[in-house]
Image: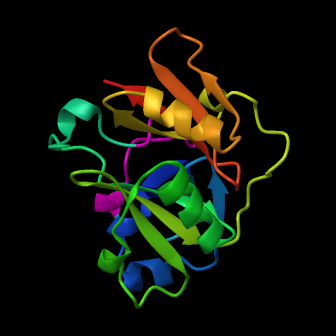
Amino acid sequence: MAFLSAGGYLVEWERLNQVQRNRLGPWRVSVASSRVSVTVSASADLPGSLRDRPNTSGDGTSNTGPSPTELPSVGYNGIQHAGVLVSNLDRSRYFYQTILGMGDETHLRNPKLPFDGAFMKVGPSTQLHLMVLPNPDPLDGRPEHGGRDRHVAMVVSNIDPIISRLAAHGIPYTMSKSGRRSVFCRDYDSNALEFFEQ
């Protein structure tokens, strides 16, 4: 969700049509964490119906709209896919297919996408999308244990085959620090992965 910060108010950027966006005059986009903020001058002509509660926190992260009880509920059904950035598709496909044993569903990938990639099958309706795109994250200096870094967690029926595959290929791994049956590793591009036994 992108928000527009103007005159102490936050407005959902997606709710503005192009004409309304153009009336805002000069605007600036900034990215912090997972939030995109578009800042305009305090005198911008904002439609009154789009104004939410004043942003009293000063950091743009709280008091940005109706309370959760005022919003319609969402029927979440799971995660369809997670995307990871990779630098070499052949090497990454080898890692995910040969080492980890994932299936290939690249035939479902839209051929019109403007970058190279592949779809790995993680479950009946879940995929891991490998995307050959520039990675803004540092590859070095990441925590040794992937559970202390951003990571993708996958459910498996037994982690022992994953551990055997990682060990056979010399891929470093760590066990969950909480004591549960879970193993962490990194791919060749330092993406942290978790395999949770359930």
Q: In which quarter of the image is residue 66?
A: top left
Residue 39: give x, y in percent of width and height: 61, 62
Left or right placement of residue 20 versus residue 115 in this view: left
**Vertical order, 24 against 147 (above or below):** below
Residue at the location (59% across, 20% down)? 175
Q: In this view, does 190 lie to the left or right of 3?
A: right
Residue 5 falls left or right of residue 149: left
Q: Does the magenta stretch include residue 62?
A: yes
| Residue 5 visible somewhere in the drawing | no
Q: What stretch is highlighted in magenta?
A: 48-64
In the rendered image, the quadrant that contains the C terminus is top left
Q: Residue drawn at (64%, 57%), measured in percent from left and top?
A: 31
Residue 187 in the image, given as x and y percentages of width and height:
64, 50
* Main secondary structure along the magenta-highlighted residues: loop
Membership of 179 in magenta stretch: no
Picture coordinates of residue 180, whole percent (x, y): 46, 12
- Give me the residue at 33% from left, 60% from top: 50
Q: Where is residue 62 in the image (x, y as percent from the top left)?
A: 49, 35
Farthest front residue?
Answer: 168
Extreme residue in the top direction = 179
Residue 179 in view of the camera: yes
At 35% from the left and 34% from the top, the residue drawn is 155
Name the outermost residue toward the right. Answer: 141
